[in-house]
Image: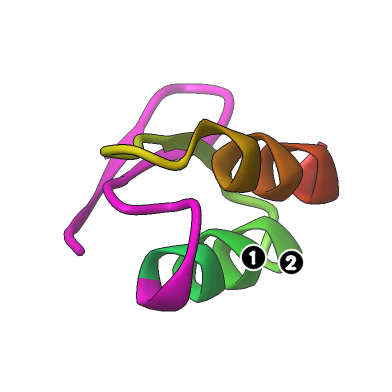
Amino acid sequence: MAEQIYTTRERKIALVTGGGRGLGRSTALILARRGISSVITYKSNKDEAEKVAELIR
């Protein structure tokens, strides 16, 4: 799991790899609570990644 935070003029955007489960999921949810938008990637579990995306929308 890795993350990178990019800043634009309007907002912060994070790239979270492995965002569908485990540490990546936790990281994406924490960032969302802090108001940081996330791009979530996954290797094989699309359904779990989509669930996380729904939670942070």
Is 12 colored magenta in this rendering? yes
Q: Residues within 10 Å of mark 1 (few under 14, many from 20)?
A: many
Q: Residue at x 64, y 65 (%)?
A: 29
Element carrying mark 1: helix
Snapshot quadrant of residue 23 = bottom left
Give the image location of residue 57, x and y in percent. Answer: 82, 36
Q: Looking at the image, which residue is at 67% across and 56% down?
A: 32
The residues bearing labels 2 and 1 have C-alpha atoms spaced at a distance of 6 Å
Magenta region: 1-23
Q: Position of residue 20 (x, y in %)?
A: 49, 52
Residue that numbered label 1 is attached to: 29
Residue 36 or residue 2, whichever sits in front: 2
Q: Nearer the viewer, residue 25 or 14?
A: 25
Residue position for label 2: 33
Q: Quadrant of residue 53?
A: top right
Residue under the point 43% across and 52% down: 19
From the viewer's perspective, tell me whether residue 5 is left or right of residue 51: left
Where is residue 18? Give x, y as percent.
Answer: 32, 53
**In this rendering, position of residue 56 left or right of residue 9:** right
Q: In front here: 19 or 44?
A: 44
Residue neighbourhood size for the residue with mark 2, other residues' Cα within 10 Å, grouped as few (<14), some (14–19), many (≥20): few
Q: Are marks 2 and 1 in contact (CB under 8 Å)?
A: yes
